[in-house]
Image: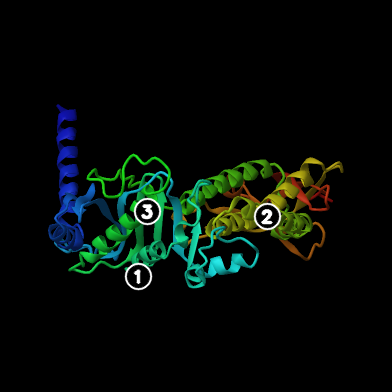
Amino acid sequence: MQWIVYGVLIVLFGGGYLLFLWYNRPREIRTALPELARQLGSAGSYSRGWSGTHKGIAYRYKFNLESTNGYDGRFGSRYDADYWTLRVLVNGAPKLKFRVTPKTDTDQFWKQFGVASPLRTGDSDFDSKFVIDQCNPDFPAGFFADKSHRDAVAAIVERGFDTVCGDGVCLEARRDRFSLSSYPDPGMITVPVENLAKLGIAGAAGPASISKSATSDSQPAANWNADGSNKAGLAGVLVIVGIVVYMAMRVLMSPYPPIDAQASFLAFLKSLTASVPVLGLTSWLLVRLARALHWSPGNLTTILIFTAAVIPFLGWSGLVVLNGKWDAHPTTSHVVKIYDRIESSGFGLNRHYHRPKYYLLVQSWHDPDARLEIRVTQQLYRQDFYGGYLLKITTGRGRFGIEWTTSMVLVKKPEPSAS
């Protein structure tokens, strides 16, 4: 009986929460988007996307809410949509695999190093404003040398779209991070549909056998999970790799910790003698590889940023590990006085979301008048060492001259000899 009551409560709370989310959905989803669909004569919903036909061209489109300005906490108040993403698709042709984006400062920078779009249209004005990349080897030669094709892309971009691309199945126009008005213009859908169809018809007119043209009545197959670019996927993979590398090196470093922050910083400076040349060589090889494989400037920039963060970290952590692992010098024990203990909440504004760090302020064995701040375990930090305890710390000289800690333990002060 008790489990039945719990189940009923869970269902009631879950249903109430879903009702709350539905009631507080953005006003664009409640009014503007349904009104736009009514004007276009398209069918669908916000979650599944809308589909319709315009001048004999079958199309699909979908709005995605990227961010909101938050919820003020009052019942009955609603979210106000802040930024949206719009994707418009029509059927394409198998040979049409490309991606055109407006040229950015990043593209201009990498162009100086030969990392730029391998395709040129012959129109200096178009080539100075747009980048054509991610093409398959069978991309029709001179496709964008046709002025009507360039005009179709330019007309789509003039409507605020950021990307025009084809994957061999669909042609897509994508617009990122824009504010949606209360009365959206149907032209934001019909203009890209008409111009995408021009590209699709031109591609279907080529020598390749085409299964369906852009004017087909069948709806384009939409993969709403794809974002039209692999930048986000690449960044996600690199973040995961970075986290794995960080955790693995932290585990390897744990048996050989430098004695204090100064020793750790010394290890970092020494590691730069190796990591800086490696970083320079790696960056040069990546640029060469990007030119050979026609990487997009955005992807190359993402990879170089990741490399610039990972290689110095690997150099520092690797030096710390080898400094202790290859240390052939005998260890030395020191018994020092404890002055104070310090607890640090680490990085962040709220200590409850960060693991605290524990330190002991002790007398330096190199200079009796100096003090060292040594990181210790929580168990050692919590011990009651006041009034009769000293710290016995065993250290190694280090293969590369970086003093590191092998063990720490509290010991009682020797009793004064009676004389």
Which corner quadrant holds the N terminus?
A: top left
**Residue type indicated by callout 1:** Glu
Front position in the image: 336 or 349: 349
Q: Residue at x 24, y 43 (%)?
A: 218
Q: Residue at x 32, y 68 (%)?
A: 159
Crowding near the residue tagged with mark 2, few <14, some 14–19, many ≥20 C-alpha atoms within 10 Å: some
Front position in the image: 245 or 91: 91
- Can residue 413 be spotted in the picture? no
Would you name the residue on which mark 1 appears?
158
Residue 165 relative to residue 419: left or right: left
Contact, mark 3 vs mark 1 (Cβ under 8 Å): no
> Measured from the top left, where is residue 331 in percent x and y?
83, 43
- Can residue 287 be spotted in the picture? yes
Choose top left, top right, bottom left or bottom right for residue 343. Answer: bottom right
Would you name the residue on which mark 2 appears?
288
Label disc, if present, on residue 202 of the rendered structure = 3
Q: Secondary structure at mark 1?
A: helix
Residue 132 relative to residue 18: left or right: right
Choose top left, top right, bottom left or bottom right for residue 7. Answer: top left
Q: Earlier in the sequence, mark 3 or mark 1?
A: 1
Q: Earlier in the sequence, mark 1 or mark 2?
A: 1
> Measured from the top left, where is residue 380 in percent x and y?
62, 46
Q: Secondary structure at mark 3?
A: helix
Q: How many numbered marks does the figure carry? A: 3
> Measured from the top left, where is residue 169 in percent x and y?
37, 44
Residue 74 relative to residue 400: left or right: left
Q: CA distance from mark 1 to mark 2?
A: 34 Å
**Residue type indicated by callout 2:** Arg
* Depicted 71 relative to depicted 97: above or below: below
Crowding near the residue tagged with mark 1, few <14, some 14–19, many ≥20 C-alpha atoms within 10 Å: few
Contact, mark 1 vs mark 2 (Cβ under 8 Å): no
Q: Residue at x 86, y 41 (%)?
A: 328
